[in-house]
C-alpha cells in the first residue's frame, strides 16, 4: 500500500509529457475538463472548445439532486491536432470565474513506467 501512495505522489509532480502520450479512444481523442462551474451549460463549453476544432461529442454530467453540473465535462475531437490545440490553449484558462484544467482522458504510459507486481 505504501508503494502505491509513493507512486501516486511521484506521478503528481510529473509534467504532462512525462506521464505519457495521448491515447485515442475508439472514435476519437477524448479530453476531460475539470473545475467546471456548477452553473455552466453544455453550450457554453461547446462554444469555447469549438474554437479549436470540431467537437464530435460532449457530456456534462449533472447532479441528480441539485440539477447543477458535477464539475467536469468529457469532450471528444476526431483529430488529435485539434484536441491538442484545445488542451494547450484551455488548460489553466478562466471559465465562469474558475481556472479549469483540461487534459487527455486516456494516456499511453511510457515504456518502463509501469508499476511492477509485488
Image (cartoon, grey):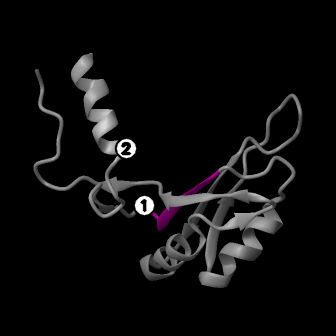
Question: On the rendered image, what quadrant is the C terminus found in?
Answer: top left
Q: Is the magenta stretch mostly helix, strand or loop?
A: strand
Q: In this view, does 50 lie above or below 111?
A: below
Q: Mark 2 points at which residue?
A: 12
* Front tag of 1 and 2: 2
* The label number, if any, that marks residue 26 in the structure image: 1
User: Residue 110 appears at what percent x and percent y?
Assistant: 19, 56
Q: Residue furthest top?
A: 1
Q: Is the Cβ of the residue at disc 1 closer than 8 Å to that at disc 2?
A: no
Q: Is residue 3 above or below residue 56?
A: above
Question: Residue drawn at (43%, 76%), measured in percent from left and top?
Answer: 80
User: Residue 46 appears at what percent x and percent y?
Assistant: 74, 70
* Residue extent of the magenta highlight: 27-34
- Asked if the magenta segment contains residue 90, the reply would be no
- Crowding at label 2, few (<14), some or many (≥20) Cα neighbours within 10 Å? few
Res 98 quadrant in image: bottom right
Looking at this view, is 14 or 55 the one in front?
Answer: 14
Question: On the rendered image, what quadrant is the N terminus found in?
Answer: top left
Res 67 quadrant in image: top right
Q: Is residue 44 above or below residue 79?
A: above
Which label's residue is closer to the chain start, 1 or 2?
Answer: 2
Circle 1 sits in a helix, a strand or a loop, which is it? Answer: loop
Question: Residue drawn at (78%, 51%), measured in percent from left and top?
Answer: 37
Looking at this view, is 54 or 109 the one in front?
Answer: 109
Question: Residue drawn at (52%, 70%), measured in percent from left and top?
Answer: 87
User: Residue 69 appears at what percent x and percent y?
Assistant: 79, 45
Q: What is the C-alpha distance between the residues marked 1 and 2?
A: 27 Å
Looking at this view, is 90 or 78 the one in front?
Answer: 90
Question: Residue drawn at (18%, 35%), measured in percent from left and top?
Answer: 115
Q: Is residue 93 left or right of residue 9?
A: right
Amino acid at each position: 500500500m505504501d508503494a502505491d501512495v509513493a507512486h501516486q505522489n511521484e506521478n503528481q509532480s510529473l509534467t504532462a509529457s512525462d506521464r505519457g502520450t495521448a491515447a485515442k479512444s475508439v472514435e476519437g481523442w477524448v479530453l476531460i475538463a475539470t473545475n467546471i462551474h456548477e452553473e455552466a451549460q453544455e453550450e457554453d463549453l461547446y462554444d469555447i472548445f469549438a474554437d479549436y476544432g470540431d467537437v464530435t461529442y460532449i457530456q456534462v454530467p449533472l447532479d441528480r439532486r441539485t440539477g447543477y453540473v458535477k464539475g467536469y465535462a468529457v469532450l471528444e475531437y476526431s483529430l488529435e491536432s485539434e484536441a491538442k490545440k484545445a488542451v494547450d490553449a484551455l488548460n489553466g484558462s478562466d471559465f465562469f470565474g474558475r481556472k479549469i484544467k483540461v487534459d487527455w482522458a486516456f494516456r499511453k504510459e511510457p515504456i518502463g513506467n509501469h508499476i511492477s507486481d509485488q
